[in-house]
Image (cartoon, helix red, strand yellow):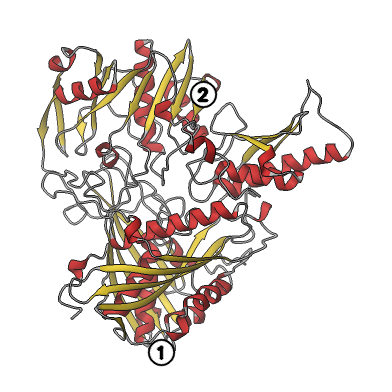
Amino acid sequence: MNSTRWEADAKVRGRALYTAEEPVPGSLHAAVVPAPVARGRLLGLDVRAALALPGVVAVYGVGDLPALRPAGFANWLADDQVHWLGQPMALVVAVDEATARAAAERVVVHVEAERPVTHFTQASEPPFAPAEAGRVPTDTQRGDPDAAVASAEIQLDLQYDVAAQHHQPLEPHACLASWGGEQLTLYSSTQAVFGTRRVVAYSLGLPREQVRVVARHLGGGFGSKGPLWWALSLRVAQAAQRLGRPVLLELTRAQMFTLVGRRSPTRQRLRLGATAEGRVTGMVHDTLAETAPFADYADPVGAATRWLYACDHVRTTHRLKRVNGPQPIPMRAPGETPGLFALETALDELAWRCQLDPLELRRRNHADHDHHLDLPWTSNGLRECWQRAADSFGWSRRPLQPGRLSDGDWLVGWGMANAAYPVNRLACEAEVVLSEGGRVRVRCGVQDMGSGTFTALADTAAVVLGVASAQVDVELGDSLLPEGPYSGGTVATASFVPAVEAAARALKARLDAGEHPSSNAPLSERARTAPPEQATLSACAFGAVFVEVRVHRVTCEIRVARVHAAYAAGRIVSPAMAYSQYIGGLVGGIGQALHEATLTDPLSGRIVNDNLGDYLIPVHADMPKFQLHMVPEHDPHLPGGVKGLGMLGTCGTGGAIANAVWHATGQRIRALPIRLEHLLGSTS
């Protein structure tokens, strides 16, 4: 298998084309005019100064472009309501990017402002239940959790807060729309090539075959390059059609905070009941989060509480309040990331109450099957993850009491948490082609966000055909190719591996039967695979994260010193890419625990840290020593044996760090991110 990225050479040499770099001749440039207030009504636009700027071609405001068919998300420039500060009020088109942005700043937006609601603590309306949380039921209950908690020997009633976060991939969102007659080609930094084609065709009233979507390379996404991006892409496509020239829109870094979603802040209440020996008898997990005035979205924050531990009495709920802020959408490990922070911190608090080692408490509550669905696991390598990571970390030497470890002026703490993420699959088509010269070509319309999809596609075909990965070419990221899945929720690899394997096996069978490609007739096979409609087993990837933190006695600076993590995620198609994904997930977890928080002015609704200087993210100097274990796991019940792992590295990391901070200082912080100001006065 290839130990380097399939596309590495193209990226290093600058030949990998990203959306904003597509060489489409004659392209115009667009810029967004933002709403200056967070709530109110548009009275009108003064565009005279903008149109007077040389090079400005057009300004499109509310009602200037044709109405779009509703497709489950807000259609901007459709009415006069202002829902949040930064909402698109107009689209300026000019001959170059600098002119478009300068003109956008000259547009005067007249509004009748109202007092906004900028955080769920300000909302006077009662919380409401959304139709679903992610793609799972909003509320669930088994047994009688209230009675189980009330009658328990040990009872905990705890609140955990997680700040709002923004995705901030390295590549800003961009789309380039080009028309050839009635045929639209949309180059877009999208995590869903075929989802984008479907929505764009429907919203514009076009047959799908008249829409081509291309996403050759993406510079990250983390969930942001999805449905909220479609609305602006559609308006760009309409502007290009009206003007008869291609139009490119690329967002600024500040606009990445207002136009393409965020992770909602959450307030979680966890009530636990347990025996004195540490066996959990009842759990109630209630989540309050934010959504927009015009749409509902709820992360499945309590989902892991439903099935991660053995407990007969469990209830989970999700409630929302409307605020005048950017619409929340999925962000890496949506739901599980904040939810596992609360759950795994609560388990740590329970362990302390029971005077048990936190790992031993989890052993006593291990779920030997999925208690929520009452189904067996396809496989569950959590016990081996515990063993591998704990042994390498030296967990057996951990003192039970907090504040017992130190190194000079640094307090040292050890914490751990479980990681888990459900297996998701979609239907997928793939084609494998063999040419006369022995080159293999894999064709699948899935996109690569930079996570290694090129490499995984090549490695999968190479293994089946018995050739080196270097002999395999890859085509992806284009709706003209066989239909692939979106990238998100650990869906992509688990979906395309079975399809590529099926096509490659069919091709190999023809080769074994004596067929050979010729100069004018390569051999090719296409396959389509899909998950079963009704699952008879429950599939999940598991892991364990062990963390050492250091907290300075005087300054309260917090440093993650080392992380030992073990994961069982079925078959690993490309170990090098898997390692990269796990480390990236752990880095994201460190960011959630110690750095990332979107700060909104409570009066105006303005995001005040809308840049990478003030929105804190972990950098190289924050990195600990990582030791990673990929536990071998054969799962015969999953096609291809793949579970997916893109979300798994982020899960549990915040809880492990918070637990380690407590073990170092004796101070329990129940809110993320943990900053030094939370610990001042408690470490001396």
Identify the image quadrant of residue 605. top left
Residue for point 16% across, 26% down = 105
The answer to whether residue 120 is visible is yes
Q: Position of residue 284 (x, y in %)?
A: 37, 70
Does residue 587 appear left or right of residue 39 in this picture? right
Q: Label 1: which residue?
A: 276
Q: Position of residue 384 (x, y in %)?
A: 58, 73
Name the kind of residue labelled 1 in the image. Answer: Ala
x 19%, y 45%: residue: 607
Q: Quadrant of the C terminus?
A: bottom left
Secondary element at image label 2 = strand
**Of marks 1 and 2, the one in the foreground:** 2
Quarter of the figure with residue 287:
bottom left
Residue hosting label 2: 212
Query: Please, what is the three-letter code of the amino acid marked with disc 2?
Result: Arg
- How far apart are labels 1 and 2 at the CA level? 62 Å
Q: Position of residue 558 (x, y in %)?
A: 27, 68
Q: Is residue 530 visible?
A: no
Q: Quadrant of residue 624?
A: bottom left
Against 48, residue 408 (above or below) is below
Q: Is tag 1's residue or tag 2's residue first in the polypeptide sequence?
A: 2
In screen coordinates, is 353 left or right of 570? left
